[in-house]
């Protein structure tokens, strides 16, 4: 995880050579309320969010493009598993 002086949210470290590859898929349609628990800084083109909804948690990836962002999400895990993957993402051990 990288923290810059002018930014309040963390930045994702560069992916390590042997990083875990996450399976990204289209957002689940019709999902109810979503709580964003943590997020990366919006000063980068790709923003990640750790989300919780309906007793499960996942990571959302948003590529900020002109117009609408391109959004993908991971598989759903328990909150503790999702927090482990979140930490791996921030440290460059997952992407």
Image: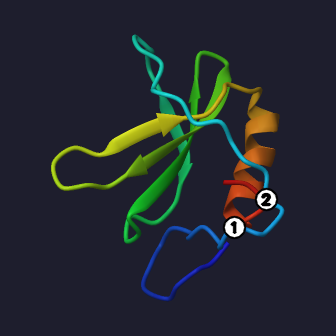
Task: Compare residues 9 and 71 and report the one nearer the observer.
Answer: 71
The residue located at (29%, 46%) in the rendering is 69
Relative to 15, does residue 65 appear above or below in the rendering? above
Residue at image mark 1? 15
| In this rendering, position of residue 1 left or right of residue 69 | right
The quadrant in which the C terminus is found is: bottom right
State the SS at label 1.
Answer: loop
Point out residue 54 in the picture as x, y percentages from the top left corner: 59, 15
Task: Compare residues 7 and 46 and report the one nearer the observer.
Answer: 46
Exactly how many numbered labels are in the figure? 2
The residue located at (68%, 62%) in the rendering is 90
Relative to 23, does residue 6 appear above or below in the rendering? below
Residue at image mark 2? 19
Q: Residues within 10 Å of mark 2 (few under 14, many from 20)?
A: some
The quarter of the displayed image where residue 45 is located: bottom left
Relative to 44, does residue 69 appear above or below in the rendering? above
Task: Compare residues 1 and 25 and report the one nearer the observer.
Answer: 25
Point out residue 28 in the picture as x, y percentages from the top left corner: 48, 19
State the SS at label 2.
Answer: loop
Task: Give the distance between the C-alpha atoms of the residues marked 1 and 2, in whole angstroms.
Answer: 6 Å
């Amino acid at each position: 995880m990288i923290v810059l002086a002018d930014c309040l949210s963390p930045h994702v470290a560069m992916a390590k050579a042997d990083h875990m590859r996450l399976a990204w898929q289209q957002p689940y349609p019709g999902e109810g309320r979503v709580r964003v628990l943590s997020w990366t800084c919006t000063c980068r083109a790709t923003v990640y969010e750790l989300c919780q909804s309906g007793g499960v948690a996942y990571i959302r990836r948003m590529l900020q493009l002109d117009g609408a962002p391109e959004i993908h999400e991971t598989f759903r895990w328990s909150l503790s598993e999702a927090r482990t993957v979140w930490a791996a993402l921030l440290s460059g051990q997952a992407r």
